[in-house]
Image (cartoon, grey):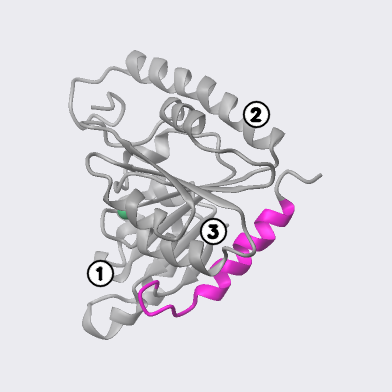
Amino acid sequence: MCGVCGCGETTTISVEQDILSENKQYAKKNSQLFIEKNMLVINIMSSPGSGKTTLLTKTLSDLKNKLKSAVIVGDQQTECDANQLKSTGVDAIQINTGKVCHLDAHMIGHALEKLPINNDMTLFIENIGNLVCPVLFDLGEQYKVVMLSVTEGDNKPLKYPDMFHNADLVIINKIDLLPYVNFDMDECINNIYKVNAQAKVFKLSATTETGLQNWYDWLLISKSQAYVN
Ligand code: MG
């Protein structure tokens, strides 16, 4: 249990402050490494089943000649996602968190010890599927990307405002399913802007490979600007 979001054990404000303050120290250490190595590091968060692994698998394959990438992926159990991501030829480390509902900076630090780190690489962190806890834990990343699929409903940004408020980029996935679901795209985008007027929003379908170019362009531009002053 994370002890912060209240999803398990009794939570007190002092415990919350201690946990987040300790996490901040580990996040700072991770961030120093990322800056030193000129890495682009992206923390991808969403509900379970939004399509994070599918999008990453396509991305790693399509951009393999343009980005040197690696992935750290979190799930409570199984190595399924790491195995799928490794099929693209990139290094992928699976973190199994057991009862814990998010990745934290300490876990990322340990995963980094096992990952071949190269200068100028891009590291994708696929967080545990959960729209609440992961956003509380800074991992030292440069960007937070939040994914929402059209099967989840257009009101998710209002129900989980902290997640969307902190996003640099929101990806609306599974747009190929729009004819079959009750999802108002304009309403969803308005809801995103209500909680985060600065958010960049991309609409795509990872499965049908529709609209991927905006995402790829954003990654390549972000990589070219990583820590350059
Ligand atoms: Mg996944």
Q: Which residue is mark 1?
A: 151
Answer few, some or many: residues within 10 Å of disc 2's Cα (few below 14, many 20 plus, some between 14 and 19).
few
- Relative to 190, is 167 above or below? above
Answer few, some or many: residues within 10 Å of disc 1's Cα (few below 14, many 20 plus, some between 14 and 19).
some
Q: Nearer the viewer, residue 141 or 179?
A: 141
Quarter of the picture containing the N terminus is top left
Q: Nearer the viewer, residue 199 or 103?
A: 103
Q: Which residue is mark 3?
A: 199
| Badge nearest the viewer, 2 or 3 | 2
Q: Which residue is mark 2?
A: 32
Whole-percent x, y for residue 144 in the image? 50, 48
Which segment did they paint magenta? 206-225
* Residue 200 numbered mark, or none: none
**What's the CA distance linking mark 2 and mark 3?**
26 Å
Q: Is residue 16 left or right of residue 214?
A: left
For numbered disc 1, what is the local secondary structure? helix
| Badge nearest the viewer, 3 or 1 | 1
For numbered disc 2, what is the local secondary structure? helix
Q: Residue at x 34, y 57 (%)?
A: 84
Quarter of the picture containing the C terminus is top right
In the rendered structure, which disc, 1 or 2, sits on the residue that comes first in sequence? 2
Amino acid type, residue under disc 1 in the picture: Thr
Whole-percent x, y for residue 25 in the image? 53, 20
Amino acid type, residue under disc 2 in the picture: Gln
